[in-house]
Image (cartoon, helix red, strand yellow):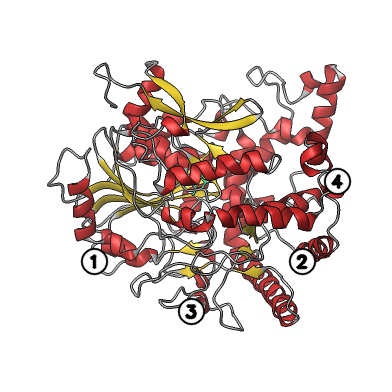
Amino acid sequence: MNKPNDDNLLPPFYKKLKAFALRKNALWSTPGHASGNGLKACPAGKDFYEFFGKHLFQADLSSSVEELGSLLEHEGAPAEAEKRAAEIFGADTTFFVLNGTSTANKVVFFATVTPGDLVLVGRNCHKSIMHAIIMNEAIPLYLTPKPCSYGLIGPVDAMQFTKESIRAKIAASRLATNKKAAKVQLAVLTNSTYDGIIYPAAEIKKKLTDLTHFLLFDEAWYAYAAFHPFYEGRYAMCVRQHRANAAYPAVFATQSTHKLLLAFSQCSMLHFRQGSGPNKLDTQSLVEANLMHASTSPFYPLFASLDVNAQIMKDSGYELLNKALDTAIRFRRAVRRAHSRYTKRGEWWFQPWQPEKKHLEKDPQDWELKPGETWSGMNIEPEDHLILDPLKITLLTPGVNPDASMTDFGIPACIVKKYLQARGVIPEKTGFYNLLFLFAPGVSTERAAELLRILHDFKWEYADNAPLAKWFPEIVAANPTRYANKGLADLCKEMHAFLKARNIMRKTAAMYTSLPEQAVPPHKAFYGLSDGKTEYVPLAKASGRVSVFMVLPYPPGVPVIMPGERFPQQDAPILEFLRANEAFDNAFPGFETEFHGVKKVWENGRVFYHVSVLNKTKKGGAV
Ligand SMILES: *Cc1c(COP(=O)(O)O)cnc(C)c1O
């Protein structure tokens, strides 16, 4: 089966793994299934073996196979594979990480941050960054995202990448011990944001050169940027050749190769480029940090999947991206055409969240967020230089004005989401009035057309006020008195009126403009848990108490409070937002908001949100 041209076509690790797996080997090592043989003994095992196929089991090997080198010591074919990937993605050093970007981010922290170090992180960063802060006992300073009227996750203002801004954050921090620090140890930005806002990475690198020792771009959603000129200058590893004497910081990129490229789940790449300063990072620290997070029994097919993805991007990265951009832009045009057709007739339709220019082309200038334009629902400054990624398509449902006030007519997106789910369509993310669809390189034109048809179907079902039992039989069966004899349009009206009465979009936007007080470092809050010094309290008793967990609502997916921060007074937007969600859960069972860090407690047929806080100290005051 090893074809003669494997030699030329296949990348180094996959080629060796395939050749080895296809040979007749007598393995006296783990894994115990011994190329799948052990599984054939019983029906479930046999089914499992046949479902996945023999090759997967033949390629599941122990690290004692010497000729395949060492994944964790980065020797032999694995090292060759990573070296090639570094060249392909534009890095000095690349590591393949097998527990996702969640782990790749922790590896970066372990390799660069020590207890007490200041780290500058976007408040809109992924939870793995907060986990890394806790594990490394770092002191976080937050970059706040722009509030967005549509409840999307805003990017960080360019104004926050200045010496003055960072100095002010250090001076204002209750936890920073070295108030005179001129630099932070590590700065972290999510590029692009979940909703597809892309930073001018080359510019930001320059701005932060003297302000941070290390810079990490979390590019979990953005591993493809190096392969299309559309993204030039806007990703971590851009600018291959620096001008002589130019100063630049040491930069990391962590990318979920499984998210928008074509690898198996859990596959991630960590890319690194040294800075211009005299202190170079000994990359052995990355090797050691990775060992602290990796299993000693890595799954070889995952590693091979990363090797193959590097090869795919080398061979056809540009074509894949170009086609994905074409498909996404065509889909956006179709939605927009339908929007103008329907609105002319006074009817509603979904609106793509994108610049208003009529004919958006594959030119980054067309996708800029410009000051003064209202479409984004965000306040854009002239120096921000942000663009929207055409591949991340947010569709807005009616209900919200660009200033976060709410219109009389509205269609809450969670109802559309449930309808889509019933039709087998799963959006990436759903907000109060928006849905996100990712146009990954694997999305075909046919699938895009099918999505459009199903969105139209929703409109007709809404117009017919189709009975809820037709589309949500389980929700109706579980709550018969609540939803009996109601239709899709009835539910939309009721839910929109509920959200409008509580002014939910203004509350969401206001929540992130002032951050809660940092009472203790995040790790101290977490250690409270293992020391048994925490308790759950209802929202009504949360004010003044110190949160143990990150409280993270979806939507919008940005934490409202971090571990170690103090819950503000009851009329602050954070608590109003939490109470509004609690009331929503009670009013619309089956459509509950998803939360991390909130315990939902049932009492007398109602749900109450409880949050975990540190115990009060002996003297009776809050910590
Ligand atoms: C998903 C995600 C991660 C974690 O990636 P996994 O590969 O799922 O572990 C990290 N950062 C961001 C911004 C993400 O969206």
Q: CA distance from mark 2 to mark 4?
A: 24 Å
Q: Is mark 1 within 8 Å of ligand 1?
A: no
Neighbour class for label 3 at 10 Å: few (<14), some, many (≥20)?
few
Residue for point 44% across, 62% down: 235
Residue for point 46% across, 24% down: 536
The local secondary structure at tag 3 comes to: helix
Give whichever of 166, 542 is nearer the camera: 542
Give whichever of 284, 145 is nearer the camera: 145
Query: What amino acid is found at the position of numbered circle 1 in the picture?
Result: Ala
Can the viewer see residue 142 in this picture? yes
| Mark 3 in CB contact with mark 2 (< 8 angstroms) | no
Front disc: 3 or 2: 2
Looking at the image, residue 31 lies above or below residue 19:
above
Q: How many marks?
A: 4
Residue corresponding to mark 2: 452
Name the mark on residue 246. 1
Residue for point 71% across, 70% down: 349
Give whichever of 104, 479 is nearer the camera: 479
Looking at the image, residue 153 lies above or below residue 618:
below
Q: CA distance from mark 1 to mark 3?
A: 27 Å
Q: CA distance from mark 1 to mark 2?
A: 49 Å
Front disc: 1 or 2: 2
Q: CA distance from mark 3 to mark 2?
A: 27 Å
Neighbour class for label 2 at 10 Å: few (<14), some, many (≥20)?
some
Neighbour class for label 1 at 10 Å: few (<14), some, many (≥20)?
few
Query: What amino acid is found at the position of numbered circle 3 in the picture?
Result: Gln
Question: Which residue is at the far left?
Answer: 180
Neighbour class for label 4 at 10 Å: few (<14), some, many (≥20)?
some
